[in-house]
Image: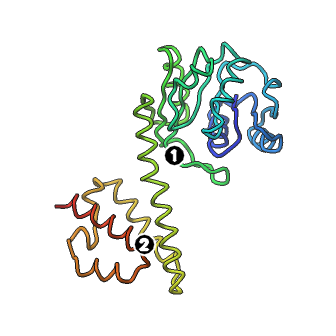
Amino acid sequence: MIVGAGNMATSLAVALAKSGNAPVAVWSRTLESASVLGKRVGCDYTDELTALPQADVIIISVVDSALCEVAAKVASLYPSALILHTAGSIPVSALRDAGATRYGVFYPMQTMSKSNIVPLDNVTIFIEGSNDADIEYLDALASSLSSKVAYATSEQRSFLHVAAIFACNFPNALYCMVAELLESKGLPFDSMLPLIDEAARKVHDMPPLAAQTGPAKRGDHNVMNAHKAMLPNELASIYEAMSNYIMKRNR
């Protein structure tokens, strides 16, 4: 059973359905969201937790700020179920504190979107559980979705989450800056796409440090100073901070 209907919940529900582990029901705070996902994967849907059928496994995938509240309600309604959450920054103990007796974490390392479901076949799914039997079950469930499954403690997962911010969210913010900078000069952002694609591809084949290029890698201060003079103050500060990091790592 899936509790939630956002990006992660949708991606997991679709992946589970394709693997033959279709959820028996979907809950969301709004019936409209629940119905969209329920119909998509062919299961019951509701906006009332008390209307959900009994289930052995319940995956809670809601915003972090609502997780503890929702988990407490789920734990009181389904005391014997294995209750899981999908949050990167919340410890597994939060489910225990919410009243769950069997609990764990199911955390795919991927950015999710309702409009673009990414196959999980090659995505590492990190798991954590409250006992050996449930960990074994989670390993089997995750293995039905992906060829890459790993155990991670709550502390390790919090570092995974921070790393994911640097690997995904921050680069996307940089792309936003690039788009604005180019558009201000009448230049197309899509001219950067082959460069972006190649930079991402390279780290599949070599360590990130070895893949680094550019004036900071070479220590070319003349070019860097000229670049900073061209940029507005906010971007110039970011350029300088990133260049300093690159230079330190490549000494």
Residue at which label 1 appears: 110
Looking at the figure, which quarter contains the N terminus? Answer: top right
Which class describes the residues within 10 Å of circle 2: few (<14), some (14-19), or many (20+)? some
SS for tag 2?
helix
User: What is the spatial separation of the Cα atoms under label 2 and label 1, in whole angstroms?
Assistant: 28 Å
**Mark 1 residue type:** Gln
Residue under the image location 35 percent in, 53 percent down: 204
Image location (x, y in percent) of residue 142: 53, 30
| Disc 2: which residue | 235
> What residue is rendered at 58% in x and 20% in y?
97
Q: Considering the numbered disc 1 on the image, is that residue within a helix, a strand or a loop? A: loop
Label 2 amino acid?
Leu
Kindly check if marks 2 and 1 are in contact, taking CB atoms under 8 A apart as contact: no
Q: Earlier in the sequence, mark 2 or mark 1?
A: 1
Q: Is residue 94 above or below residue 231?
A: above
Rendered position, 10 above or below 103: below
The front one of 161 and 38 is: 161
Residue that protrudes farthest toward the front in the picture:
233
Q: Quadrant of the C terminus?
A: bottom left
Q: Pinpoint residue 68: horizontal percent, then vertical percent.
A: 63, 29
Q: Is residue 59 left or right of residue 141?
A: right
Q: Quadrant of residue 150?
A: top left
Q: Which mark is residue 218?
A: none
Disc 1 crowd rating (10 Å Cα; few below 14, some 14-19, many 20+) is some
